[in-house]
Image: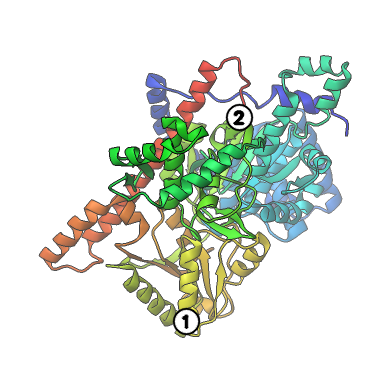
Amino acid sequence: MQANPSVLWHTLDHGVSEKPILTGLDAVCHTGLGELDRLSGRRLRFLRQAKRVLHLEKCYADINNGCLHEEVESLRSLFRRHRDTPADLERAFAVIREVAFRQIGERPYLVQVMGAFALTHGCIAEMGTGEGKTLTATLPATIAGWRGLGCHVITVNDYLAKRDAQWMGDIYRFCGVNAAYIEQGMPQNHRHHAYLADITYCTNKEVSADFLRDRIALGAIKTSDMALLSRFKTDASRTLNRVVQRGLNYAIVDEADSVLIDESVTPLIISGPAPNNEQLDAYAQASSLSTSLQPDLDYRVNTRHREIELTPQGRDALSQWADAGHGLWKAPRRREELIVKALTAREFYQRDKHYVVQDKKVVIVDDFTGRLMADRSWRDGLHQAVEAKEGLELTPIKDTYARISFQRFFRLYRTLSGMTGTAWEARREFWSVYHLPVVVIPPNRPCQRKLYPDVIMRDQAHKWAAILTEIQHMHSQGRPVLIGTRSVHTSELLSRMLTQEQLEHEVLNAVRHQEEAKIVAFAGQAGRITVATNMAGRGTDIKLGPGIADLGGLHVICAEKNESNRIDRQLFGRCARQGDPGSARAIVSMEDDLITRHAAAQTRWARKLSLRLGVNQSSAITRSVFHHAQKRTQALARRQRKSVMKTDRWLEEQLGFAPTW
């Protein structure tokens, strides 16, 4: 595979300069500009443009394919030479709408065209679940493909990347652009050709990992001039041939709140083996020793911040044990780090919630999707500490070659945009971190979702009994039911309860994406009961079976409030799509993890006040506890993301000689 000079030029000189992180008065002014931007009438402007696009429909509906193809080629040439005007963009969208109708039988609605304008102008488009974001993305993606600098459409998993690239492929081919996809395990030469495509569908993990690998391969080569000179050197030329990407020009991020907010501080790390048997033995010894330490006596647990602090008694016990040890245990600070890591694994990382054990290996469960992440591991010895706790063979220690957070990676794109069903709550963070305004796109049809009041039980046992009663009630009416849980353990617990009641059901907890999509697609059929961890099946449409709309549609039950209200909204958004009827209810308890971690004191206060006033557990008083807990967790998460930004800035300022990646 030969390196293409134009590809190297894009890689080295385009889209690899990070947008500045504003501080002090600059940050305050930027926030003020964001507030003014929301008052600028952007949404109304996009609506007027979308109406003009629909008005052009009659100009192309009656022409034959040959004439339509000539119009496509004319526009393609115009955009490739960057001589287009706003009127040309409207005409292009009108043409692509007609192409979509002829190729896949779907013509984007008015609101989808609005969303396309938002994406083209570098915004986050909030479009409700089921509003057709996949088709919406084809309009701006085609325009970006015509410009010839590449477009990355970021999806949430490999299955959706492949599905969407193939599903929308006929539209792109008629428009004179080609689309490809990246999936895990794809050979390097296939990746190279996929990135050379005009439009590349991929996941955030794959595209960022390929970026890091390219930067490692390039080494000291940081400009196109250096790359051209290095082509005269045999060794350097081989290095350039290993580059697969052609730069970070334009990205459309699907489920943008999940990728750019929830997972933004997740570090992507490229590492290699660094055997250290002495350190592995120390992790195993620390795990064994941690079982002899007592909470409150030897160490204190900070549940909210997930931190362990040794007490003086614990340090003395550790010191006495270390006197008989050797190596790493001789250094006080190092042995405390080892034992704290072991206690952290024991206190905060639960099997079937944060991880599962498969084939005698620890496999991480994604907190936000409930999916397994077999290719990822915790860093700084935590993964080995969890393995030691489970009595498994410890994986070898690895050295870090390169790392980058998703937050920093996506700031490298020249133009960034995104789509999601829940963006408004995070609008200030989208603006301050990524300089992206949020535009709320209205639904194509009025939403008919019935959102019932929360049911709050005093303990877990009563909560699960109430959930089971609700499922039986809906099932007796023939309505399909979707229950969202937050962990593998709770989904299996509910599954056992349903089995005991002889209720047939499907369980989605970190299965393969293709199976997941198929199961979720049928979750709207009569009498179906589907138990899903968190947002399993996100990106797959749930269509109601015959007659289900007359019964009230899909009913969604939230079995535990999430740490962000946005994720709760995403779950409820699985019902009542595209004007269909549907209903949703949260059935929770005061013993849920969210409350015990973040609102324990408020819970005691609420119980006393409820008893004194004689009100029930689902009163406004107890509901306010959940609201308070979510606000605290969201504030904590924002502080963590801000801390990562500060660390990135510090590294760039203090290590100015280091590469920007």
At numbered mark 2, what does the secondary structure look like: helix, strand or loop?
loop
Q: Quadrant of residue 512?
A: bottom right
Label 1: how many Cα within 10 Å (few below 14, some 14–19, many 20+):
some
User: Can see residue 428?
Assistant: no
What's the CA distance linking mark 1 and mark 2?
Answer: 49 Å
Residue 590: % across, % down: 29, 62
The amino acid marked with disc number 1 is: His
Residue 100: % across, % down: 72, 54
For the residue pair 355 and 459, the one nearer the viewer reads as 355
User: Can see residue 123?
Assistant: yes
Q: Quadrant of residue 561?
A: bottom left
Residue 631: % across, % down: 33, 47
Please tell me which residue is depicted at 70% across the width and 38% down the height of the picture: 151
| N-terminal label among 1 and 2 | 2
Residue 297 vertical placement versus 245 (above, below): below
Which disc, if any, is residue 412? 2
Drawn side of residue 85 relative to residue 407, left or right? right
Residue 308: % across, % down: 37, 42
Q: How is the image coloured?
A: rainbow
For the residue pair 170 and 599, the one nearer the viewer reads as 599
Please tell me which residue is depicted at 24% across the width and 60% down the height of the picture: 622
At numbered mark 1, what does the secondary structure look like: helix, strand or loop?
helix
Asked if the residues shown at circle 1 and circle 2 are in contact, with their CB atoms under 8 angstroms apart, the answer is no
For the residue pair 212 and 297, the one nearer the viewer reads as 297
Residue holding disc 1: 475
Quadrant into which the C terminus falls: top right
Label 2: how many Cα within 10 Å (few below 14, some 14–19, many 20+):
many
Quadrant into which the N terminus falls: top right
The amino acid marked with disc number 2 is: Leu
Drawn side of residue 95 relative to residue 548, left or right? right
Q: Residue furthest front?
A: 324
Which disc, if any, is residue 363? none
